[in-house]
Structures are given as C-alpha cells and as structure tokens.
Image (spheres, helix red, strand yellow):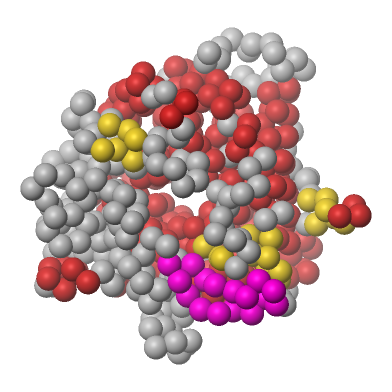
Amino acid sequence: MHRDRSITPSDLLPRIDRLFEISAAKIRSLEASWRPEDGAPVFTVNGRWQSRGWTEWTQGFQFGSSVLQFDATADREFLRLARGHTVERMAPHLTHTGVHDHGFNNVSTYGGLWRLAREGRFDASEWEVRFYELALKVSGAVQAARWTRLANGGFIHSFNGAHSLFVDTIRSLRALALAHLLGHRLVQEQDTSVSLLERMIQHARATAEYSIYYGNGRDTYDIRGRTAHESLFNAANGTYRGPSTQQGYSPFSTWTRGLAWAMLGFAEQLEFLTVVRDEELSTFGGRAEVERWMLDAARATCDFYIDAATASDRIPYWDTGAVGLSALGNWKERPADPFNNHEPVDSSAAAIAAQGLLRLGHLLDARREDGTRYTQAGLMVLSTLTDESGPYLSKDAAHQGLLLHSVYHRPNGWDHVPAGSAIPQGESSQWGDYHLREAALLVRRMAKREGYLTFFASGSEARDPGLGVRDPGLGVRGSGPRGPGEDDGAGSDG
C-alpha cells in the first residue's frame, strides 16, 4: 500500500484477521509459560517474556489483550481468560496508591469487560456488571487522590513524586472518566467531596499547558507539537521549573512514545466529552473552551508526529533528538530501518500513535471538519505494522511477542541487544502488543460498521462520539439479578 493512494479500513481487514490469528497463539503461549510469582511480563528477551521491576504497569495489558482478542474473534476461550485473571489477580492494582498507571491496568481489564457487557457481547449478570463498576469507581478515585495542587488546578503526579507530571498519564485519565460516568466521586479529609471530572479536566489542562509545545517561544526548543516526557514543579508552591525526561534522550528532544501517549490521550478525552453534559463543563469555561484547548493539543501532537517525528512509512525512531539519527542521513525520506546500527525504532510508539491519529480523524469528520490527513496517516501506520512481508509482525511461533522492534528504556539499557547488532531490535513489549491489537480492533469495527470503539461504550447501540450524544445510558443488561459467585455459562479461568 503506497502513500499516493487512499487506504480504507476495509483494505486492512485481511491483515487484521491474520493479526488476530497470530495473536491468539501468542496469548496462549504466554498463558502456558508465565509464572504469576514472577510479576507482570514486560518485554521479551530472545523472544521470551521477562519481568522488569520498576512499577507493575503492564499486567493490565497482559490480561486486557484477552479482552481485545475475544472482542475481535468471539472466541470464548479468551473471555474466560480475561474474566478469570481480572478477578484473581488485578485487585491490588485497584488500590495501588503509588502509581499513575490506573488507566493502563484497570481500564484495560475491568473497563474492557464492563464495555463488552455494556455492548451486549456476553451475558453478564447484574452482579458481574456491578462488580466491574465498583472496581472502576475505586480505581478512578484512588488515581485522582495522587494529586499535586497548582495555582490554577493541579495534576496526577507520577511515581517519581509530587513534583513530577508525566505526559503518559493523559491516558490514565480514562479511569477518572469512567468513575465519573458511573456517578462516583473522591471523598477526602472531613468528608470533602472532590469531582473526578474536575480532576480529569485539570490534569488534562496541565498536560496541555506544560507537556505540549505550540511554537510560541516558550523556550529555545519550542516546536509546535513537540512533547516533554516529564514536567517538573516545586511541589511546595506549585511553580513550574522546567522539562525533564526519564526514558527520552533529553528534556529538549521528543521521546516518541510520550508523544504517542499525548496524541491518543487527548483524542480519547475529546471523544469522552461527547457524553458529558454541557452544564458539567460550565465550571471549566464551557464546552467550547475545553474542546478548544484539547483539540489544539491533539492537532499539534498529531501534526508533529506526521511532519517531524517519523520516517516515510510513519514509523518513528525512539526519540527525535537521539544523537545517532545524524548518521542515518535523510531518515525521514525513507522507511524506518529497525536493523540499522545507530538508533532503534519504537514500533510501540507507532501502534499507540496510530490509534490517536485515527480517533482525531474520526472526531474531525464527525464535527464536519476534514480529518482525512490524520485518518490516512493512522491507517498507513497500521498497514505497515500488520504487513506480513514487513519487519514488524511477529510470525515466528517460537517468539512470544506480537509486535517486533519495541523499545522500553533506551537510556537505562534495559532493551535486549542481539548478537551482531549495536542497538536493540527484534523484541516485543506488553504495551506495544496490546495497542497493536487495540488499533486493529478499532479499524476492524470501522470497516465492518460494528459500532465505533470507545472505552466508555454504553450499550449495544454503540453510539458514535462526535455526533453530540450526551446521555451515557447506563442501564444494566442481563437476565436478572444473580449472585457474584453464580456462573452465566461462560465459565471462568481457574
């Protein structure tokens, strides 16, 4: 598929079907070999999954992948895995007060199952739905409690501490969004009630202001759409101190996975606003104002990805400022080369970015604006990653990963460098595999007109965000009340 022709979602259906065929074997392989006592699988080394102690932020991707596999294939084996593992192993993540990763772990599992139940994809009892809803309420409130106050709002601080705003956390806002949608709130000292919608919007606003650049001369390296992985504050008085990074090359270059998190996070937040009532947004300047700055952030980051961060096939290297890129010459003018000896590509950033591009394009089309630029870029990324003749889709049955050439932490040297190479290559990550599946599922639904995929789906009618729907309609589907221990016929794992 070439850049000079339009790609449609239907064009990719054969590749997506093949992707989920390969994906099933990868999930089964991990299920058969992984020992829970080893923690969460993070990335592969020589094709086998390994853990890596930092924070347990990848468990939700492991079990959430079974949610996506069932959604795409209706194979109830994966529904049983998703339900069983979520019940048995995810509870500690609901009350984990030390991380900013609730949207990754809990929306991918409890949230994914809740979404499938809302869409009528399996016969969930009233008690099962309520179980998922209670979990999502707890997760949203616990995430929102990790709060640093600023003069004009605040943000959910990273595991580094109260001074640290990570751009990644924009996608964890899904936890607050769902908890708010379910009517929940955070209650703090002396019964102070805290709006989860308020904290969601305030965090998004802080991310838009401090993590995203707009070409306004903020510093010497202010290029529109560039992102800072970490923003540092004086936690005592809330003043901004400057950009930083944990996993990028420098504070003044763009770590491309952080860029991708921003692209997807802001696009999803804009979609979520379509089910928020106008009066709920009046406190924040009104719908038009909130959508304005969110859309500015989404457009800027997506434009930067297309124009400045990727090779000609829309696949990025791991950081736009990595010093070895200079040895690659005009790398933007040709497809990314994961086998070069200077700097690694990051296919996981591409998988995340694809979904951000597709969601922004869809949203703009629904607003009667032209989203073609973003939709075509997103489809091109997915086409490249799912091409069996290309370097990214893992077809080797002995390799447990699905998406090859993912990078985790280049500065710390955590990624496997195979013999004969100077850089990491050929390995997979849980977030890369999960987001490839999620992007493929989104496009599959678009092609088959099965209902647009959102994390806040409210029923089998699958309302389309961007068309002004404000009523989430959270009626419970099921054949009547049953106790939490009663089976609905689908079974559970373990």
Q: Nearer the viewer, residue 236 or 230?
A: 236
Query: Is 24 on the left-hand or right-hand side of 149?
Result: left
Secondary structure mostly seen in magenta is strand
One can see residue 366 in this view = no
Magenta stretch encompasses residue 233: yes
Q: Which of the two residues, 346 or 293, is positioned nearer the viewer here?
A: 346
Whether residue 252 sits left or right of residue 88 in the image: it is left
Q: Quadrant of residue 2?
A: bottom left
Identify the magenta region.
Answer: 230-245
Where's residue 172, x and y in %?
Answer: 57, 52
Residue situated furthest right in the rendering: 190
Residue 42's x, y, as percent? 39, 40
Q: Quadrant of residue 135?
A: top right
The vertical placement of 145 against 76, above or below, is: below
x 46%, y 25%: residue: 36
- Nearer-the-camera pick, 165 or 80: 165
Of the pair 349 and 14, the residue shown nearer to us: 349
The answer to whether residue 317 of the structure is visible from this angle is: yes
Place residue 200 in its image quadrant.
Answer: bottom right
